[in-house]
Amino acid sequence: MIFEIQGVDFINKGGELMTHAVVQHFDSSEKKDIVAAHLRMGTFEQREKTSLYHLTWAYVEKFPQAGSLINNLSSFLPQKLRRSFKLITAKEVQAILDASGFTYGDQQGARMIEIMANRIKTRKKEGKKIILLPQAFGPFKSKRVREAFLEILENADLVFARDEISYQYLQEIQGLVKNCPPIKISPDFTNLVKGKVPEYFDKKLRRGCIVPNYRMVQRTTKEIKEKYISFLALCVKYLIKKEIEPFVLIHETKTDYELALQLQTQVGRSLEIIQEQSPLYIKGILGNSFIVIGSRFHSLVSTLSQAVPCLGTGWSHKYQMLFDDYNCSECLISPADPEEKVYNALDIIVEEPSRSDIINRLNVASQEQKKLTSEMWQEVEQFLQYK
Protein backbone atom coordinates (compact mmCIF):
# COMPACT_ATOMS: atom_id res chain seq x y z
CA MET A 1 0.00 0.00 0.00
CA ILE A 2 1.16 3.55 -0.70
CA PHE A 3 0.71 6.16 2.05
CA GLU A 4 1.13 9.91 2.15
CA ILE A 5 2.24 11.32 5.50
CA GLN A 6 1.22 14.88 6.29
CA GLY A 7 1.24 17.30 9.20
CA VAL A 8 4.95 16.84 9.97
CA ASP A 9 8.18 18.60 8.99
CA PHE A 10 11.95 18.57 9.48
CA ILE A 11 12.09 21.77 11.57
CA ASN A 12 10.62 20.34 14.74
CA LYS A 13 12.49 17.17 15.68
CA GLY A 14 9.34 15.80 17.27
CA GLY A 15 7.61 15.94 13.89
CA GLU A 16 10.60 14.32 12.25
CA LEU A 17 10.60 11.59 14.89
CA MET A 18 6.94 10.87 14.12
CA THR A 19 7.93 10.49 10.47
CA HIS A 20 10.60 7.97 11.47
CA ALA A 21 8.01 6.12 13.56
CA VAL A 22 5.63 5.77 10.60
CA VAL A 23 8.37 4.75 8.14
CA GLN A 24 9.91 2.27 10.58
CA HIS A 25 6.57 0.60 11.20
CA PHE A 26 5.78 0.02 7.55
CA ASP A 27 9.39 -0.86 6.70
CA SER A 28 9.26 -3.62 9.29
CA SER A 29 6.49 -5.46 7.46
CA GLU A 30 6.86 -7.75 4.47
CA LYS A 31 4.08 -6.01 2.59
CA LYS A 32 6.43 -3.63 0.76
CA ASP A 33 4.47 -0.59 1.84
CA ILE A 34 5.61 2.87 0.71
CA VAL A 35 5.40 6.11 2.69
CA ALA A 36 5.71 9.34 0.68
CA ALA A 37 5.83 13.04 1.55
CA HIS A 38 5.06 16.03 -0.67
CA LEU A 39 7.83 18.11 -2.21
CA ARG A 40 7.54 21.03 0.22
CA MET A 41 8.24 18.79 3.21
CA GLY A 42 11.98 19.21 3.54
CA THR A 43 14.52 18.60 0.81
CA PHE A 44 15.12 15.56 -1.37
CA GLU A 45 18.10 14.73 0.84
CA GLN A 46 16.07 14.94 4.05
CA ARG A 47 13.34 12.72 2.65
CA GLU A 48 15.94 10.23 1.40
CA LYS A 49 17.59 10.01 4.81
CA THR A 50 14.22 9.24 6.37
CA SER A 51 13.48 6.55 3.73
CA LEU A 52 10.54 8.54 2.39
CA TYR A 53 9.46 8.48 -1.21
CA HIS A 54 8.85 11.78 -2.99
CA LEU A 55 5.21 12.65 -3.69
CA THR A 56 5.22 14.68 -6.90
CA TRP A 57 2.84 17.21 -5.47
CA ALA A 58 3.60 20.59 -3.95
CA TYR A 59 1.10 22.23 -1.63
CA VAL A 60 1.29 25.90 -2.63
CA GLU A 61 -1.74 27.69 -1.20
CA LYS A 62 -1.22 30.84 -3.29
CA PHE A 63 -0.75 28.81 -6.49
CA PRO A 64 -2.79 25.62 -6.03
CA GLN A 65 -2.38 24.77 -9.70
CA ALA A 66 1.35 24.21 -9.10
CA GLY A 67 0.73 20.87 -7.43
CA SER A 68 -1.41 19.59 -10.29
CA LEU A 69 1.10 20.76 -12.87
CA ILE A 70 4.05 19.00 -11.20
CA ASN A 71 2.00 15.89 -10.61
CA ASN A 72 0.69 15.73 -14.19
CA LEU A 73 4.17 16.13 -15.66
CA SER A 74 5.54 13.29 -13.53
CA SER A 75 2.64 11.06 -14.58
CA PHE A 76 4.06 10.92 -18.08
CA LEU A 77 7.13 9.11 -16.78
CA PRO A 78 6.95 5.29 -16.87
CA GLN A 79 6.21 3.81 -13.46
CA LYS A 80 9.43 1.79 -13.47
CA LEU A 81 11.42 4.99 -13.99
CA ARG A 82 9.47 6.82 -11.27
CA ARG A 83 10.14 4.02 -8.81
CA SER A 84 13.87 4.08 -9.57
CA PHE A 85 13.86 7.71 -8.38
CA LYS A 86 11.37 6.98 -5.56
CA LEU A 87 8.71 9.20 -7.13
CA ILE A 88 5.03 8.73 -6.30
CA THR A 89 2.14 10.47 -8.05
CA ALA A 90 -0.91 11.68 -6.14
CA LYS A 91 -3.08 9.15 -7.96
CA GLU A 92 -1.00 6.26 -6.63
CA VAL A 93 -1.55 7.23 -2.97
CA GLN A 94 -4.14 5.00 -1.29
CA ALA A 95 -4.24 6.37 2.25
CA ILE A 96 -3.37 9.59 4.09
CA LEU A 97 -1.68 9.38 7.50
CA ASP A 98 -2.08 12.66 9.36
CA ALA A 99 0.54 12.98 12.12
CA SER A 100 0.00 16.64 12.95
CA GLY A 101 0.80 16.30 16.65
CA PHE A 102 -1.03 19.38 17.93
CA THR A 103 -2.54 21.36 15.07
CA TYR A 104 -6.27 20.95 15.60
CA GLY A 105 -7.39 23.26 18.37
CA ASP A 106 -7.93 26.89 19.39
CA GLN A 107 -4.30 27.42 20.43
CA GLN A 108 -3.05 26.94 16.87
CA GLY A 109 -5.60 29.22 15.21
CA ALA A 110 -7.94 28.56 12.30
CA ARG A 111 -5.76 29.23 9.25
CA MET A 112 -3.72 26.01 9.24
CA ILE A 113 -6.77 23.91 10.15
CA GLU A 114 -8.66 25.37 7.19
CA ILE A 115 -5.73 24.55 4.90
CA MET A 116 -5.59 20.98 6.19
CA ALA A 117 -9.36 20.64 5.85
CA ASN A 118 -9.15 21.56 2.16
CA ARG A 119 -6.33 19.08 1.59
CA ILE A 120 -8.15 16.25 3.33
CA LYS A 121 -11.43 17.02 1.57
CA THR A 122 -9.67 16.86 -1.81
CA ARG A 123 -7.95 13.57 -0.98
CA LYS A 124 -11.20 12.05 0.25
CA LYS A 125 -12.92 12.92 -3.03
CA GLU A 126 -10.13 11.02 -4.76
CA GLY A 127 -11.15 7.90 -2.85
CA LYS A 128 -8.28 7.78 -0.38
CA LYS A 129 -8.55 6.60 3.22
CA ILE A 130 -7.91 9.29 5.84
CA ILE A 131 -6.42 8.34 9.22
CA LEU A 132 -5.58 10.82 11.95
CA LEU A 133 -2.80 9.16 13.93
CA PRO A 134 -2.55 9.76 17.72
CA GLN A 135 -2.34 13.46 18.44
CA ALA A 136 -3.68 16.16 20.76
CA PHE A 137 -7.00 17.83 19.90
CA GLY A 138 -9.00 20.81 21.08
CA PRO A 139 -10.41 22.82 22.57
CA PHE A 140 -12.78 23.99 19.81
CA LYS A 141 -14.40 27.12 21.25
CA SER A 142 -13.49 29.28 18.23
CA LYS A 143 -16.18 29.09 15.56
CA ARG A 144 -13.68 29.12 12.67
CA VAL A 145 -11.52 26.46 14.29
CA ARG A 146 -14.52 24.26 15.08
CA GLU A 147 -16.08 24.53 11.61
CA ALA A 148 -12.79 23.77 9.87
CA PHE A 149 -12.10 20.76 12.05
CA LEU A 150 -15.65 19.44 11.65
CA GLU A 151 -14.94 19.32 7.92
CA ILE A 152 -11.87 17.20 8.68
CA LEU A 153 -13.92 14.87 10.88
CA GLU A 154 -16.54 14.49 8.13
CA ASN A 155 -13.88 13.26 5.74
CA ALA A 156 -11.78 11.16 8.11
CA ASP A 157 -12.12 7.39 8.35
CA LEU A 158 -10.34 6.73 11.64
CA VAL A 159 -9.21 9.12 14.41
CA PHE A 160 -6.91 8.53 17.37
CA ALA A 161 -6.79 10.96 20.28
CA ARG A 162 -3.51 10.96 22.17
CA ASP A 163 -5.00 11.52 25.61
CA GLU A 164 -8.23 11.53 27.58
CA ILE A 165 -8.75 15.31 27.44
CA SER A 166 -8.33 15.36 23.65
CA TYR A 167 -10.79 12.48 23.44
CA GLN A 168 -13.32 14.45 25.51
CA TYR A 169 -12.93 17.49 23.25
CA LEU A 170 -13.72 15.28 20.26
CA GLN A 171 -16.74 13.76 22.00
CA GLU A 172 -18.14 17.23 22.61
CA ILE A 173 -18.30 18.00 18.89
CA GLN A 174 -18.73 14.60 17.25
CA GLY A 175 -22.52 14.96 17.38
CA LEU A 176 -22.21 17.85 14.92
CA VAL A 177 -20.93 15.45 12.23
CA LYS A 178 -23.43 13.31 10.32
CA ASN A 179 -21.11 10.36 9.84
CA CYS A 180 -18.47 10.67 12.52
CA PRO A 181 -15.59 8.23 12.11
CA PRO A 182 -14.49 5.88 14.92
CA ILE A 183 -12.60 7.86 17.59
CA LYS A 184 -10.18 5.97 19.80
CA ILE A 185 -7.45 6.69 22.34
CA SER A 186 -3.82 5.71 21.82
CA PRO A 187 -0.56 7.20 23.15
CA ASP A 188 2.07 9.05 21.16
CA PHE A 189 3.48 6.51 18.73
CA THR A 190 7.12 7.62 18.79
CA ASN A 191 7.67 5.53 21.92
CA LEU A 192 8.55 2.50 19.74
CA VAL A 193 11.36 4.29 17.88
CA LYS A 194 14.83 3.25 19.04
CA GLY A 195 17.38 5.99 19.46
CA LYS A 196 21.06 5.94 18.57
CA VAL A 197 23.89 7.39 20.63
CA PRO A 198 26.31 9.60 18.66
CA GLU A 199 30.01 8.89 19.14
CA TYR A 200 30.67 12.35 20.62
CA PHE A 201 28.29 11.79 23.55
CA ASP A 202 29.89 10.15 26.58
CA LYS A 203 27.31 7.84 28.14
CA LYS A 204 29.43 7.28 31.25
CA LEU A 205 29.17 10.85 32.53
CA ARG A 206 26.42 12.11 34.86
CA ARG A 207 24.90 14.67 32.54
CA GLY A 208 21.81 16.81 32.89
CA CYS A 209 19.99 17.61 29.65
CA ILE A 210 18.05 20.87 29.31
CA VAL A 211 15.52 21.02 26.45
CA PRO A 212 14.01 24.53 26.05
CA ASN A 213 10.85 25.37 24.14
CA TYR A 214 10.11 28.86 22.77
CA ARG A 215 6.37 28.20 23.06
CA MET A 216 6.83 28.57 26.80
CA VAL A 217 7.38 32.28 26.22
CA GLN A 218 4.98 32.51 23.29
CA ARG A 219 1.79 30.76 24.40
CA THR A 220 1.74 31.02 28.18
CA THR A 221 0.71 33.56 30.78
CA LYS A 222 2.73 36.71 31.42
CA GLU A 223 4.00 35.28 34.70
CA ILE A 224 5.34 32.10 33.11
CA LYS A 225 6.89 34.00 30.20
CA GLU A 226 8.81 36.19 32.62
CA LYS A 227 9.93 33.31 34.85
CA TYR A 228 10.72 30.60 32.29
CA ILE A 229 14.43 31.33 31.71
CA SER A 230 14.93 31.99 35.42
CA PHE A 231 13.34 28.61 36.13
CA LEU A 232 15.74 26.86 33.72
CA ALA A 233 18.67 28.73 35.26
CA LEU A 234 17.58 27.61 38.71
CA CYS A 235 17.59 24.00 37.50
CA VAL A 236 21.01 24.36 35.88
CA LYS A 237 22.53 25.75 39.09
CA TYR A 238 20.99 22.86 41.01
CA LEU A 239 22.61 20.35 38.65
CA ILE A 240 26.00 22.02 39.01
CA LYS A 241 25.68 21.91 42.80
CA LYS A 242 24.91 18.17 42.57
CA GLU A 243 27.94 17.63 40.30
CA ILE A 244 25.75 16.78 37.32
CA GLU A 245 27.18 18.42 34.20
CA PRO A 246 24.41 20.42 32.43
CA PHE A 247 24.08 20.86 28.67
CA VAL A 248 21.38 22.17 26.36
CA LEU A 249 19.85 19.99 23.65
CA ILE A 250 18.04 21.81 20.84
CA HIS A 251 14.87 19.96 19.80
CA GLU A 252 13.74 22.54 17.23
CA THR A 253 16.12 24.03 14.69
CA LYS A 254 15.36 27.76 14.96
CA THR A 255 14.01 29.67 17.92
CA ASP A 256 14.93 27.33 20.77
CA TYR A 257 18.60 28.16 20.24
CA GLU A 258 17.91 31.78 21.18
CA LEU A 259 16.55 30.59 24.53
CA ALA A 260 19.73 28.56 25.07
CA LEU A 261 21.82 31.71 24.66
CA GLN A 262 19.59 33.60 27.11
CA LEU A 263 19.98 30.73 29.58
CA GLN A 264 23.78 30.90 29.34
CA THR A 265 23.68 34.61 30.12
CA GLN A 266 21.47 34.13 33.15
CA VAL A 267 23.52 31.23 34.52
CA GLY A 268 26.68 33.25 34.09
CA ARG A 269 28.77 30.50 32.51
CA SER A 270 29.08 28.72 29.18
CA LEU A 271 26.98 25.64 28.57
CA GLU A 272 27.49 23.05 25.88
CA ILE A 273 24.72 23.46 23.31
CA ILE A 274 24.08 20.39 21.17
CA GLN A 275 22.31 21.03 17.85
CA GLU A 276 21.89 17.51 16.58
CA GLN A 277 20.13 17.11 13.24
CA SER A 278 19.14 13.47 13.62
CA PRO A 279 16.07 12.87 15.82
CA LEU A 280 17.35 9.33 16.38
CA TYR A 281 20.57 10.69 17.88
CA ILE A 282 18.53 13.16 19.92
CA LYS A 283 16.51 10.29 21.36
CA GLY A 284 19.73 8.41 22.05
CA ILE A 285 21.17 11.38 23.94
CA LEU A 286 18.00 11.76 26.00
CA GLY A 287 18.00 8.06 26.81
CA ASN A 288 21.56 8.21 28.12
CA SER A 289 21.28 11.36 30.21
CA PHE A 290 21.21 11.14 34.00
CA ILE A 291 18.31 13.59 34.16
CA VAL A 292 16.30 15.58 31.60
CA ILE A 293 14.64 18.93 32.28
CA GLY A 294 12.43 19.55 29.28
CA SER A 295 9.60 21.54 27.77
CA ARG A 296 9.43 19.99 24.29
CA PHE A 297 6.67 17.36 24.24
CA HIS A 298 8.48 14.76 22.17
CA SER A 299 11.69 15.21 24.12
CA LEU A 300 9.67 14.21 27.18
CA VAL A 301 8.08 11.24 25.39
CA SER A 302 11.55 10.08 24.32
CA THR A 303 12.82 10.49 27.87
CA LEU A 304 9.95 8.86 29.74
CA SER A 305 9.62 5.96 27.28
CA GLN A 306 13.29 5.12 27.99
CA ALA A 307 12.70 5.25 31.77
CA VAL A 308 14.96 8.27 32.31
CA PRO A 309 13.81 10.49 35.21
CA CYS A 310 12.89 13.97 34.09
CA LEU A 311 11.38 17.22 35.24
CA GLY A 312 8.86 18.57 32.77
CA THR A 313 7.01 21.81 32.24
CA GLY A 314 4.56 22.61 29.45
CA TRP A 315 2.03 24.94 27.90
CA SER A 316 -0.99 22.72 27.10
CA HIS A 317 -3.02 19.83 28.47
CA LYS A 318 -0.94 17.30 26.54
CA TYR A 319 1.91 17.58 29.06
CA GLN A 320 -0.21 16.74 32.10
CA MET A 321 -1.75 13.79 30.26
CA LEU A 322 1.70 12.51 29.26
CA PHE A 323 3.03 12.51 32.82
CA ASP A 324 -0.18 10.88 34.04
CA ASP A 325 0.31 8.11 31.45
CA TYR A 326 3.79 7.46 32.81
CA ASN A 327 2.61 7.52 36.44
CA CYS A 328 4.92 10.35 37.50
CA SER A 329 2.68 13.43 37.64
CA GLU A 330 4.77 14.83 40.49
CA CYS A 331 7.59 15.39 37.97
CA LEU A 332 5.59 18.00 36.04
CA ILE A 333 5.73 21.51 37.51
CA SER A 334 5.24 25.13 36.47
CA PRO A 335 8.01 27.72 36.03
CA ALA A 336 5.88 29.91 38.30
CA ASP A 337 6.11 27.42 41.19
CA PRO A 338 8.09 28.48 44.29
CA GLU A 339 11.80 27.63 44.30
CA GLU A 340 11.29 25.23 47.19
CA LYS A 341 8.85 23.16 45.14
CA VAL A 342 11.28 23.05 42.21
CA TYR A 343 14.13 21.90 44.48
CA ASN A 344 11.92 19.24 46.08
CA ALA A 345 10.90 17.91 42.66
CA LEU A 346 14.53 17.77 41.56
CA ASP A 347 15.55 16.03 44.79
CA ILE A 348 12.96 13.33 44.17
CA ILE A 349 14.45 12.70 40.72
CA VAL A 350 18.12 12.85 41.71
CA GLU A 351 18.30 11.37 45.22
CA GLU A 352 17.75 7.78 46.34
CA PRO A 353 15.57 5.90 47.04
CA SER A 354 12.99 8.08 45.24
CA ARG A 355 15.01 8.06 42.00
CA SER A 356 14.95 4.26 41.76
CA ASP A 357 11.24 4.27 42.53
CA ILE A 358 10.60 6.65 39.62
CA ILE A 359 12.74 4.56 37.26
CA ASN A 360 10.80 1.41 38.22
CA ARG A 361 7.48 3.16 37.63
CA LEU A 362 8.68 4.48 34.27
CA ASN A 363 9.79 1.03 33.15
CA VAL A 364 6.38 -0.45 33.92
CA ALA A 365 4.50 2.44 32.30
CA SER A 366 6.77 2.43 29.26
CA GLN A 367 6.01 -1.21 28.52
CA GLU A 368 2.28 -0.52 28.78
CA GLN A 369 2.46 2.54 26.50
CA LYS A 370 4.45 0.62 23.89
CA LYS A 371 1.91 -2.20 24.01
CA LEU A 372 -0.90 0.31 23.39
CA THR A 373 1.00 1.76 20.42
CA SER A 374 1.45 -1.70 18.91
CA GLU A 375 -2.29 -2.27 19.31
CA MET A 376 -2.95 1.05 17.56
CA TRP A 377 -0.93 -0.05 14.53
CA GLN A 378 -2.83 -3.34 14.50
CA GLU A 379 -6.11 -1.40 14.39
CA VAL A 380 -4.83 0.73 11.51
CA GLU A 381 -3.82 -2.32 9.53
CA GLN A 382 -7.08 -4.08 10.28
CA PHE A 383 -9.00 -1.03 9.12
CA LEU A 384 -7.04 -0.94 5.89
CA GLN A 385 -7.91 -4.63 5.42
CA TYR A 386 -4.42 -6.01 5.15
CA LYS A 387 -4.36 -9.57 3.88
Image: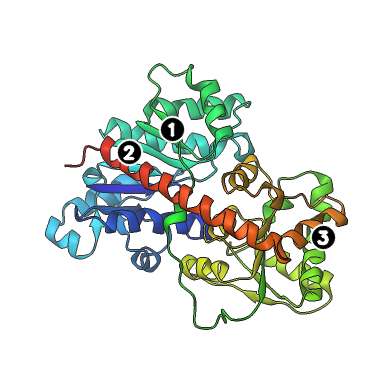
Single out the residue that lies furthest toward the front: 353
Q: Element under label 3?
A: helix
The percent coordinates of residue 264 (x first, y second) are: 77, 73
Q: For mark 2, what is the residue?
A: 379
Compared across the picture, whether 385 is left or right of 312 comes to left
At 87% from the left and 57% from the top, the residue drawn is 339
Name the amino acid, label 3: Tyr
Question: Is residue 238 shown above or below 337?
Answer: below
Q: Contact (CB < 8 A) between labels 1 and 2?
A: yes
Q: For mark 1, what is the residue?
A: 184
Within 10 Å of disc 3 (Cα), the crowding (few <14, some 14-19, many 20+) is some
Within 10 Å of disc 1 (Cα), the crowding (few <14, some 14-19, many 20+) is some
Q: Contact (CB < 8 A) between labels 3 and 1?
A: no
Earlier residue among tags 3 and 2: 3
Q: Element under label 1?
A: strand
Viewer-side residue, 204 vs 222:
204
Q: Is residue 9 visible?
A: no
Q: Is residue 352 visible?
A: yes
Which of discs 3 and 2 lies nearer the camera? The answer is 3
Residue 91: image quadrant is top left
Q: For mark 3, what is the residue?
A: 343
At 46% from the left and 58% from the top, the residue drawn is 17
Report how far apart the C-alphas of labels 1 and 2 lie in the structure: 10 Å
At 51% from the left and 65% from the top, the residue drawn is 283
Report how far apart the C-alphas of labels 3 and 1 lie in the structure: 38 Å
Which color scheme does this rendered protein use?
rainbow
Report how far apart the C-alphas of labels 3 and 2 lie in the structure: 43 Å
Compared across the picture, whether 333 is left or right of 203 comes to right
